[in-house]
Image (cartoon, rainbow, N blue to C red):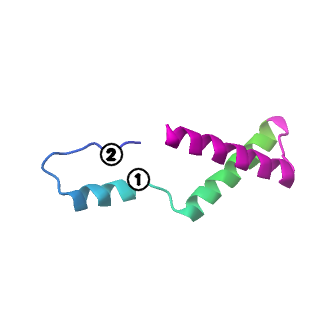
Amino acid sequence: MPVPVNPSQSLRAYLARLADTLLTPRERAQQAEQVCVALHQWEGYAPSPAEQQRLDEDLDRRLARAVGR
């Protein structure tokens, strides 16, 4: 969710508001685990650790390519 820019707001205040919208690494990990559980319950999807690693590497590669453009 983007943080709206207020022209009269200081950079420090803007960055503080932006930080409030971001998840911590622990929160991201918890959210990812909840999604995995939901996918498994919904359609039986349960990747092996090797498949999970391959998917993570593919996502990292795609993100790096997107950022590089």
69 left or right, relative to 29 = left
Residue 3: assigned label = 2
The residue lying at 58 percent from left, 56 percent from top is 28
> Real-space Cα distance between discs 2 and 1?
8 Å
Task: Residue 47: give x, y in percent of width and height.
Answer: 84, 46
The residue lying at 75 percent from left, 45 percent from top is 55
The residue lying at 84 percent from left, 45 percent from top is 46
Residue 21: assigned label = 1
Q: Quadrant of residue 66?
A: top right
9 left or right, relative to 53 = left
Outermost residue on the front side: it is 68
Residue 31: assigned label = none
Task: Residue 57: give x, y in percent of width and height.
Answer: 72, 49
Picture quarter with the N terminus: top left
- Magenta part of the protein: which range? 43-69
Task: Residue 61: give x, y in percent of width and height.
Answer: 65, 44
Q: Main secondary structure of the magenta part?
A: helix
Answer yes or no: do the residues labelled 2 and 1 have beta carbons within 8 Å? Answer: yes
Could you tell me the amino acid type at mark 1? Thr
Could you tell me the amino acid type at mark 2? Val
Q: Is residue 69 above or below residue 56?
A: above
The residue lying at 50 percent from left, 57 percent from top is 23
Crowding at label 1, few (<14), some or many (≥20) Cα neighbours within 10 Å? few
